[in-house]
Image (cartoon, helix red, strand yellow):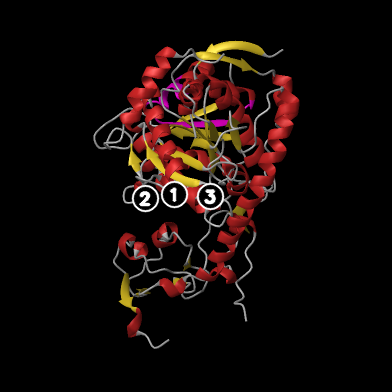
């Protein structure tokens, strides 16, 4: 039986803005995961500005979180954090 | 009214772009492309042309600017030559993949090293696998006409692919010749305004060129493959309509010259066809039944048209003015493609590969005579005696001097 590929719109052009596109999950590319130390985080939002994949979320009441479905582990958030609150931890250290 | 002008291939393309009312042109200097950017800049500065001209900091930026402009809905142009073409290489597949029909002008120039300003087709041929449509013009008139036809084909809603108007550096880009500049009304009738279905627009935002999963890649590549097959039908349709509107009729894929009774034929593309035609006149006087098939398109490759035409002949000598080191039969890209296109065709001719005119060298009459002599010996033997010939590098030119003598004795046919 022939393999069924995912349907793709013309030139992969998709509507915007949208925070999540279920057809294009790219978090499985990552081998280092950003982890925030909430004791140190000042919620300055620098990481939010710099994240190229819009994965940093301040919507929740308990401060910064990362949308790991799309985070590719590039480390830009960790590099730009002015207080060193974000570290990069190998994916193999996590169970899920 | 159409007017007769004297100009180069590059001024002819600048005229085509002005008539096409382009919105954006991205530039970065490199010879021989530079003259078209200078021509556009002059016209914009003088107020005779309305166009946003953006200067990149290199060829990669230059093609990226054109890409962005096209995404925003502009009719965008750019161009380059030689190593400039290859410096922008990363941008070609994304431009074709996002189906942006920008038009680039490539004035061929040899690739380094060493620095050589001469023409050969190698720079443009490196782009054959990226989903751009292109072919070579033989003179200024054809450069102008191709440019208008390419816009029309590339911007068709069923196609939406970028195009390259390729021309031999200096032979076409810089030699002044007469050409007819069409009337604005004619061009407006032939070429509608560019109106893409998708564009970057704050009122209707879309994401272009997003990251995708591997499973989504093959369908996108399949789309590009299928649309390339549609381009062939569109070429036939547009070439015919061009003839009706402008009165200049071109063969859609392959131009034939003195092939009616020929049993041997030269196959080439680009400006060397001009010398080839005059060499054929002398060869005919010397008793050679030889003609010329000039390819007007390289991508999509006109395999069906070529197969139909070449079966009429016994020997086809494919002349490459570019290189592909280590390619089969010591040939270049064109000869490899012609052989592949003919591989399953019944009654195909013996196909012989020649490489000539590298580094901007003119292919002289004597060199055409030498190639014809080799083809004649192939014809008599019924097989290739010496394959993959780099003209002037093989000890096989005895025939050339004999034909050369015949040339001086016989007057050319008018």
Instruction: Say which of B291 and B126 sits in front.
Output: B291
For the residues tagged 1 and 2, is the chain the same? yes
Q: Which residue is mark 2?
A: B329
Q: Which residue is mark 3?
A: B131
Magenta region = B20-38
What label does residue B220 carry, if any?
A: none
* Chain identity of mark 2: B
Instruction: Say which of A6 and A55 sits in front.
Output: A6
The part of the image, by quadrant, that contains residue B148 is top right
Q: Judge left or right: residue B36 versus residue A80.
A: right
Callout 3: SS: loop
Q: Residue furthest bottom?
A: A95
Q: Nearer the viewer, mark 3 or mark 2?
A: 2
> Which of the two labelled residues, at mark 3 and mark 1, occupies the earlier sequence position?
3
User: Is residue B132 inside the magenta stretch?
Assistant: no
Residue B123 x, y percent position in the rendering: 39, 39
Q: Residue furthest front?
A: B380
């Amino acid at each position: 039986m022939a393999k069924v590929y995912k349907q793709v719109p013309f030139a992969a052009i998709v509507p915007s803005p949208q925070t999540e596109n279920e057809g294009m999950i790219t978090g499985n590319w990552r081998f280092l995961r950003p982890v925030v130390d909430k004791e140190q985080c000042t919620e300055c939002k620098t990481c939010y500005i710099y994240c190229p994949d819009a994965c940093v979320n301040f919507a929740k009441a308990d401060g910064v979180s990362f949308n790991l479905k799309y985070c590719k582990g590039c480390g830009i958030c960790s590099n730009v954090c002015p207080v060193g609150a974000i570290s990069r931890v190998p994916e193999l250290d996590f169970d899920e | 009214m159409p007017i007769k002008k004297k100009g180069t291939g590059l001024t002819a393309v600048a005229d085509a772009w002005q008539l096409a009312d382009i919105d954006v042109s991205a530039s970065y200097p490199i010879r021989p492309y530079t003259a078209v950017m200078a021509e556009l800049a002059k016209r914009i500065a003088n107020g005779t042309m309305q166009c946003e001209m953006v200067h990149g900091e290199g060829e990669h930026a230059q093609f990226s600017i054109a890409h962005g402009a096209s995404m925003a809905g502009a009719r965008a142009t750019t161009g380059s030559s030689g190593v400039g073409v290859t410096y922008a290489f990363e941008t070609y597949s994304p431009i074709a993949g996002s189906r942006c029909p920008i038009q680039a002008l490539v004035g061929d120039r040899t690739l380094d090293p060493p620095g050589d300003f001469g023409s050969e087709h190698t720079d443009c041929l490196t782009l054959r696998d990226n989903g751009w449509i292109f072919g070579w013009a033989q003179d200024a008139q054809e450069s102008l006409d191709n440019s208008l036809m390419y816009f029309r084909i590339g911007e068709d809603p069923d196609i939406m692919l970028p195009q390259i108007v390729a021309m031999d550096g200096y032979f076409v880009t810089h030699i002044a010749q007469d050409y007819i500049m069409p009337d604005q009304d004619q061009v407006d009738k032939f070429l509608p305004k560019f109106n893409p279905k998708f564009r970057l627009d704050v009122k209707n935002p879309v994401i272009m060129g997003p990251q995708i999963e591997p499973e989504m890649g093959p369908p996108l590549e399949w789309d590009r493959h299928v649309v390339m097959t549609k381009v062939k039908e569109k070429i036939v349709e547009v070439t015919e309509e061009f003839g009706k509107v402008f009165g200049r009729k071109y063969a859609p894929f392959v131009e034939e010259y003195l092939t009616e009774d020929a049993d041997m034929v030269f196959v080439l593309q680009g400006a060397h066809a001009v010398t080839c035609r005059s060499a054929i006149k002398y060869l005919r006087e010397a008793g050679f039944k030889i003609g010329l098939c000039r390819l007007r398109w390289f991508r999509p490759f006109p395999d069906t048209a070529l197969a139909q035409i070449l079966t009429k002949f016994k020997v086809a000598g494919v002349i490459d003015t570019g290189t592909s080191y280590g390619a089969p039969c010591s040939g270049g890209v064109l000869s490899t493609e012609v052989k592949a296109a003919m591989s399953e065709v019944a009654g195909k001719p013996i196909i012989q590969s020649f490489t000539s005119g590298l580094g901007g060298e003119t292919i002289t009459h004597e060199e055409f005579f030498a190639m014809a002599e080799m083809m004649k010996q192939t014809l008599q033997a019924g097989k290739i005696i010496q394959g993959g010939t780099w003209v002037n590098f093989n000890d096989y030119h005895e025939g050339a001097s004999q034909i050369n003598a015949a040339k001086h004795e016989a007057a050319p046919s008018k």
